[in-house]
Amino acid sequence: MNRQQEIEELFSMFHDFEIQSVSKDGEALTLEFVIPWGQVWNPAILEYQIKVELSGCRNLLCEYFVFKDDEANKLKPLALRETEIRTTNAPQTIEELGLEVQSYTYTQPDSYVLHCNSSKEIAGGELTLTATDYRIFDSFDKPLTLDQLKQWAAEWWGRVQEMWDEQKK
């Protein structure tokens, strides 16, 4: 498996990953996420964070949808409110949006779009970036492997499936 395939595999595990911090230095992009997987560990860790360092980040752009700020719009149910599109490439602004990665799209040779929703007053957004290599770290800044993340993801989704099965009974 080459590095692009590994980055794809990494992003394929991102679901409900809340973006906590964003920094960019040249072509190096660092994203820190709160991941939900720690909730099923024993003991549970509710706010477990990982850091992903991406290299080859020549492009970074976030398109996000802000709810229109008028009285008529505020009276509508959230799902029906009108939005305005905004764009930024400023890491601080992206960080402040409260975006949660739900899925991704890959376009060769090295472009990724992270599709996000938001827990704040934003209808969601898309973070578009380029990357050619990566490193992953745990909340203690110790290196993590892709295989370790795969194991955690399997545990998480296994527990979610158990919960769904219990609810069907």
Image (cartoon, rainbow, N blue to C red):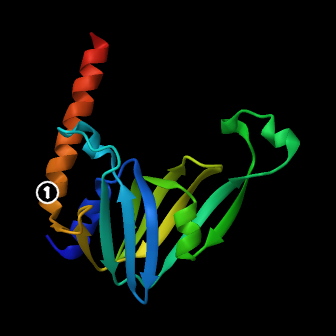
- Asked which secondary structure carries label 1, the reply is helix
Q: Is 91 situated left or right of 160 in this image?
A: right
Above or below for 99 versus 54:
above
Using the rendered view, name the quadrant where residue 143 is placed.
Answer: bottom left
Q: Position of residue 120 (x, y in %)?
A: 60, 49
Q: Is 93 situated left or right of 115 in this image?
A: right
Q: Position of residue 123 (x, y in %)?
A: 62, 49
Viewport quadrant of the N terminus? bottom left
Viewport quadrant of the C terminus? top left
Residue under label 1, please give it.
Answer: 148
- Residue drawn 50% across and 66% down? 127
Q: Position of residue 103 (x, y in %)?
A: 40, 53
Q: Nearer the viewer, residue 130 or 76?
A: 76
Above or below for 97 versus 22:
above
Q: Is 7 situated left or right of 42 in this image?
A: right
Above or below for 9 versus 102:
below
- Residue drawn 31% across and 74% down? 53
Amino acid type, mark 1:
Gln
Above or below for 152 versus 162:
below
**Which residue extends farthest bottom?**
26
Q: Position of residue 52 (x, y in %)?
A: 31, 69
Q: Nearer the viewer, residue 144 or 101?
A: 144
